[in-house]
Image (tube, helix red, strand yellow):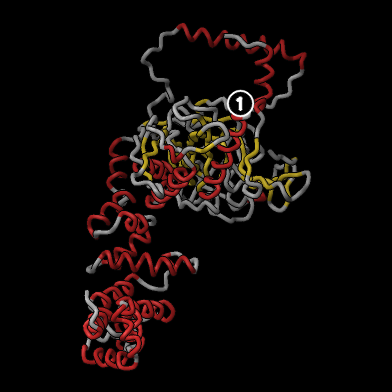
């Protein structure tokens, strides 16, 4: 894409400003019980080689049979990326040797992937407009096994539990221009996959990982030579790897050197990328159609049925939250980032003020959950309880300050918020007689401050505080404010 | 189309087949004979003809998403030259 270059995204080198060009290949494990071409389990954390069939171990004579659920999930993901779905696709063999690849080839899709071009709309922090990252393709392929190198100085240990697990490789076009954009793109893609339920997005377990292609150029120049950073497994590391790699490339070019196209590895401990494979060993994969597998074909009706049953996706949900509940774009983004958060909010907001509910869910509940490192699904406060607190504030039964105390009680002890307010005498005092008495007492006890307040109206705050304190926080702050102004002779 | 001796060595290395220098000229001859034979197919006009994938029209066979296999590491490791604690053990490979 040759959009005008935003100078803020450029990296300052010693001799010039540089533009970073990034494309991402995301490997997302398909959410299934069994593997792509065998009946072995995909369960995480099993004993070594427990989830392995003779197909996954590539014993002679074994034949792959595709898991229909993987096909379904790949199509649904394609639909979620607004991508073109190819009714006929082909599985190919990608040939290379490695001990955790028992077949000697990976079954993948090369020239005819199941999903073609699509796009993802990405909100980037600090940007007024979202960016669009175009998707080049999505294809299905097998994962490899896992090698462990630290058990013995001379030996590697191989576990084939992952061997043959279905992956969706989602390839973006080189539309990304900064580490911030890359991080936002991966986060958004993960959200879409989780909404669809096609991948759980668990990066710690390696269920979502990225190969990051980075090159640099002077704005307006043709694309520079790219390096591919393999297997980065957190959003934060993706950002760091891009920063480090861009600076490495800029340094080389500014010193008069050239970039070698190569595969590199990001080492988060050292904060550097280093070469993985030398150019001499550059892979020649010799792709050819897998003779064990017919082309994958399905009709439009199959795709339409899947499209009709798709859940509401993040972009649509965000737009609906803005329209239906009058939320700000920011609040709507926060609430729609996870399906569970969005569902929680909607349940809490049912029949009451959406904006007020959103404030409570985001500021109080999410704040508290974050502090304790808990997930919304493990919230001790239910949507109904939040709704009830919002109602109590709305009806004027409790003040905003008391509401925070109430939230604390509901968080630690549970219970019906309305009943707690009754039982513990937390109701806001709106009885003007009682408030007036408290106001008069404070004024009578502080004649010097009353004098000061006449010259300095900002003293009002001090009086409001005293009255609130005397009422145990239960006086209606608006009433207190008005009454004090009148009695102290402060205008406005 | 024909292959030179460098290509023969490269193909052998990619396939992890040990080929001695003495074997290269012979293999070059064999490969070029095969390529010559295949080349005859280029004389056939196949414009607009889809590559045939099966003799009778049929759809790819599919399986349900059900776990039907596994839980037998012992059987999987039976033919391994070396294994330990449920793992295949191979000479160290580090990138």
User: Picture coordinates of residue A177 (x, y %)?
Assistant: 45, 38
Q: Does residue B77 appear in the picture of this structure?
A: no
Of residues A241 and B64, the one nearer the viewer is A241
The numbered mark 1 sits on a residue in which chain? A
The image quadrant where one finds the N terminus of chain B is: top right
The image quadrant where one finds the C terminus of chain B is: top right
A104 relative to B48, above or below: below
In the shown orientation, is residue A9 left or right of residue B89?
left
Query: Which residue is rendered at x = 35% and y = 33% of the image?
Result: A87
Of residues A264 and A55, the one nearer the viewer is A264
Callout count: 1
Query: Which residue is rendered at x = 48% and y = 9% of the image?
Result: B42
In the shown orientation, is residue A338 left or right of residue A292?
left
User: Picture coordinates of residue A479 (x, y %)?
Assistant: 23, 82
Query: Which residue is rendered at x = 63% and y = 13% of the image?
Result: B31
Residue A360: name its quadrant: bottom left
Query: Which residue is rendered at x = 28% and y = 67% of the image?
Result: A356
Residue A229: name its quadrant: top right
User: Picture coordinates of residue A455 (x, y %)?
Assistant: 30, 79
> Secondary structure under badge 1?
loop
Of residues A104 and A474, the one nearer the viewer is A474
Crowd around label 1: few <14 · some 14–19 · many ≥20 (10 Å): some
Q: Does residue A218 appear in the picture of this structure?
A: yes
Which residue matches tag 1? A258
């Amino acid at each position: 894409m040759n959009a005008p270059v935003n100078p803020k995204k450029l990296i300052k080198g010693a001799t010039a400003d540089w533009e970073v060009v990034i494309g991402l290949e995301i490997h997302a494990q398909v959410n299934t019980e069994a593997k792509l071409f065998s009946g072995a389990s995909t369960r995480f954390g099993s004993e070594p080689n427990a989830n392995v069939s003779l197909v996954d171990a590539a014993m002679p004579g074994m034949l792959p049979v595709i898991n229909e659920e993987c096909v379904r999930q790949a199509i649904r993901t394609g639909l979620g990326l607004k991508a073109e779905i190819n009714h006929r696709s082909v599985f190919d063999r990608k040939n290379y040797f490695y001990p955790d690849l028992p077949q000697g080839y990976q079954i993948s899709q090369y020239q005819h992937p199941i999903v073609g071009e699509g796009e993802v709309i990405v909100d980037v922090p600090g940007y007024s407009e979202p960016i669009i990252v175009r998707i080049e393709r999505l294809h299905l392929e097998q994962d490899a096994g896992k090698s462990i190198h630290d058990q013995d100085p001379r030996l590697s240990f191989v576990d084939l539990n992952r061997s043959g697990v279905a992956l969706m490789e989602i390839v973006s076009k080189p539309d990304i221009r900064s580490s911030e954009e890359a991080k936002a793109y991966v986060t958004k893609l993960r959200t879409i996959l989780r909404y669809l339920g096609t991948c759980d997005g668990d990066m710690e377990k390696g269920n979502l990982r990225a190969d990051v292609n980075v090159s640099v150029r002077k704005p307006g120049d043709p694309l520079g030579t790219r390096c591919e950073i393999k297997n980065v497994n957190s959003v934060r590391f993706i950002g760091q790897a891009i920063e480090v790699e861009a600076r490495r490339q800029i340094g080389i070019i500014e010193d008069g050197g050239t970039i070698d196209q190569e595969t590199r590895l990001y080492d988060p401990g050292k904060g550097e990328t280093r070469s993985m494979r030398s150019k001499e060993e550059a892979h020649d994969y010799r792709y050819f159609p897998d003779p064990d597998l017919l082309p994958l074909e399905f009709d439009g009706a199959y795709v339409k049925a899947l499209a009709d049953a798709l859940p509401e996706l993040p972009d649509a949900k965000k737009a609906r939250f803005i329209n239906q509940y009058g939320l700000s774009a920011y609040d709507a983004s926060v609430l729609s980032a996870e399906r569970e958060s969005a569902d929680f909010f909607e349940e809490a907001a049912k029949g009451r003020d959406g904006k007020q509910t959103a404030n409570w869910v985001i500021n109080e509940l999410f704040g508290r959950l974050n502090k304790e490192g808990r997930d919304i699904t493990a919230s001790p406060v239910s949507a109904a309880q939040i709704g009830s607190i919002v109602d109590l504030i709305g009806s004027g039964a409790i003040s905003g300050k008391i509401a925070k105390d109430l939230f604390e009680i509901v968080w630690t002890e549970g219970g019906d918020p309305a009943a707690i307010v009754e039982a513990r005498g937390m109701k806001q005092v709106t009885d003007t007689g009682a408030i007036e008495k408290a106001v008069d007492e404070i004024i009578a006890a502080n004649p010097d401050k009353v004098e000061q307040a006449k010259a300095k109206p900002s003293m009002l705050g001090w009086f409001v505080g005293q009255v609130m304190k005397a009422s145990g926080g239960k006086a209606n702050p608006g009433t207190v404010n008005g009454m004090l102004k009148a009695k102290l002779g402060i205008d406005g | 189309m024909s292959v030179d001796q460098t290509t023969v060595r490269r193909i052998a290395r990619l396939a992890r087949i040990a080929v001695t220098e003495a074997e290269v000229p012979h293999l070059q001859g064999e490969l070029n004979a095969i390529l010559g034979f295949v080349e005859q197919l280029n004389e056939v006009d196949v414009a607009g003809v889809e590559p045939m994938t099966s003799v009778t029209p049929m759809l790819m066979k599919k399986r349900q998403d059900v776990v039907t296999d596994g839980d037998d590491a012992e059987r999987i490791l039976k033919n391994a030259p070396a294994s330990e604690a449920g793992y295949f053990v191979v000479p160290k490979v580090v990138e």
